[in-house]
Amino acid sequence: MKFDTSDEWKWDIEVDHERPIPFPKHCRLPLPDRDHYSELYDLTTDLTEEEKQSPYAKYYYMGQAMPDKDDLAQVEFDTPMDPAKAFLIEDYAANMDVPGCCPVRNGYCILPNGIAFATATTTYEGVTAEVMANFIENFNPPKDLYYKVWCPGAHIRHGMGYAIEDTGTGMSLIQFTEGLDAEKVGLNVGSGDKNCIGLTGANTFCKPLHNPDGEPLYVTELCYYRLVGNAYEERVTFWIGAEFKDGKTVPRLHHGKPVDATFAQTLARHSLWETTTLMRIAVDFWKECNE
């Protein structure tokens, strides 16, 4: 192993080696209170001098990994999907937990109620359960470096209950208000879709980083994980202008107006780029650990 895995850099993570679920490791820093919020303006996507000295810095300099061109083509600007193929959050399990999983891999649209729907799927060959478990347990860049290498040029920080990143519409502060799991969305993992290994998600709200007192944009995100042969697959779905409460999709639209489709489109694209990059890192890191 060429990397420092001392206790100072390690995270308290329990990994199911048969069904490993990746997640962003936060830097353990809380969101500054209002009097110190301006400290966030000093953060950038660039590496600090300390981060440049880390052996993990090379993953940052590799840049973002290119998603599958066919996947990208499905979330091009001004090419929305048919809203009839989208679904509300309470219908998530019925649409995903079926043999072969949901036929809609990628797309975005505005639902009749004004909520935006966006979904992005990344399938990456060579990421077995063993490869992903090794990544989760042993890939441990310090502080903000983990989040920066996950999507170079777009990610800044994943802290305690929040993230700072640019999903395509400028730097945003994303706050996680409630975690969502398989039980909350009525998903019996692996019942209909035998390749499903788990689910994570959250209700969140987003604000432009420069406008912390502005009206938040509510977004619910669910991440569905599958092992398909020698490939690892992550399906990320967003409902923008909504949250999930008491088993129902609750519209949270700005002044009752439909969400701008551009936000849904850029969010789906960003998800493809960041997930593809993470998968590439998992494979490269596995190779280095086993040289």
Image: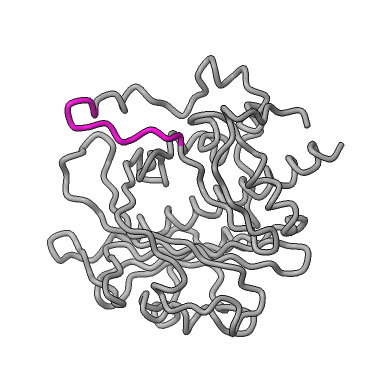
Residue 221, image quadrant: bottom left
Question: For the image shown, how many numbered marks are present on the structure?
Answer: 0
Q: State whether the magenta stretch is mostly helix, strand or loop.
A: loop
In the image, farthest residue toward the left: 255
Q: 184 above or below 129?
A: below
Residue located 50% across and 19% down the image = 48
Residue 30 falls inside the magenta stretch: yes
Instruction: Judge by depth and name the residue closer to the eye, 175 or 60.
Output: 175
Counting from the top left corner in percent of width and height, residue 202 is at 38, 59
Q: 239 above or below 133?
A: below
Q: How is the image coloured?
A: one colour
Q: Tell me: 204 left or right of 152.
A: left
Residue 81, image quadrant: bottom left
Q: Quadrant of the N terminus?
A: top right
Q: Quadrant of the C terminus?
A: top right
Residues in magenta?
Answer: 27-37
Whether residue 79 is visible, yes or no, is: no
Counting from the top left corner in percent of width and height, residue 136 is at 63, 47
Q: 237 above or below 95?
A: above
Residue 70 falls inside the magenta stretch: no
Residue located 47% across and 65% down the image = 119
Residue 42, image quadrant: top left
Instruction: Judge by depth and name the residue closer to the eye, 170 or 183.
Output: 183
Q: Tell me: 266 left or right of 290.
A: left
Whether residue 249 is visible, yes or no, is: yes
Counting from the top left corner in percent of width and height, residue 228 is at 71, 69
Residue located 38% across and 59% down the image = 179
Instruction: Judge by depth and name the residue closer to the eye, 246 or 95.
Output: 246
Residue located 55% across and 47% down the image = 274
Counting from the top left corner in percent of width and height, residue 97 is at 54, 81
